[in-house]
Amino acid sequence: MPLSTTLSDAALIERSWRDPEDFALLFDRHAGHIHRYVARRLGDDTADDVVSETFLAAFRQRRDYDTARPEALPWLYGITTNFIRRH
């Protein structure tokens, strides 16, 4: 099985501390959810930018992620909501 289906979000984030490319698997897993969330609030055009900003911020903050929480989607929604407020 590929890593993207066998590891929790927390495990992927922790792996990305050593191998930053593994963070792309988190993007693949959740970008669609985040995009739909933003598009409903700001429209499709702005959603693309906010999704990019969200995952860039999450990547930069990944060492602060609480790996005791296996699911990162609430964390990503929190980051996204902050960007939505700025737009």
Image (spheres, rainbow, N blue to C red):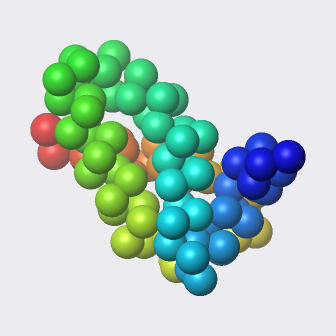
Q: Is residue 42 above or below residue 30?
A: above
Q: Position of residue 59 (x, y in %)?
A: 42, 66
Q: Quadrant of residue 5?
A: top right
What residue lies at 14% left-to-right and 38% top-to-bottom? 87
Is residue 35 in view from this perspective?
yes
What residue lies at 47% left-to-right and 43% top-to-bottom? 77
Q: Residue furthest left?
A: 87
Q: Residue furthest front?
A: 1
In the image, 45: left or right of 75? left
Q: Position of residue 8 (x, y in %)?
A: 76, 55
Question: How many numbered marks have been drawn onto this rendered protein structure?
Answer: 0
Q: Quadrant of residue 36?
A: top left
Is residue 65 in view from this perspective?
no
Q: Residue furthest bottom?
A: 18
In the image, 44: left or right of 23? left
What residue lies at 18% left-to-right and 29% top-to-bottom? 46
Closer to us: 42 or 60: 60
Q: Position of residue 9 (x, y in %)?
A: 68, 55
What residue lies at 58% left-to-right and 51% top-to-bottom? 25
Q: Is residue 33 above or below residue 23?
A: above
Q: Position of residue 28 (x, y in %)?
A: 54, 42
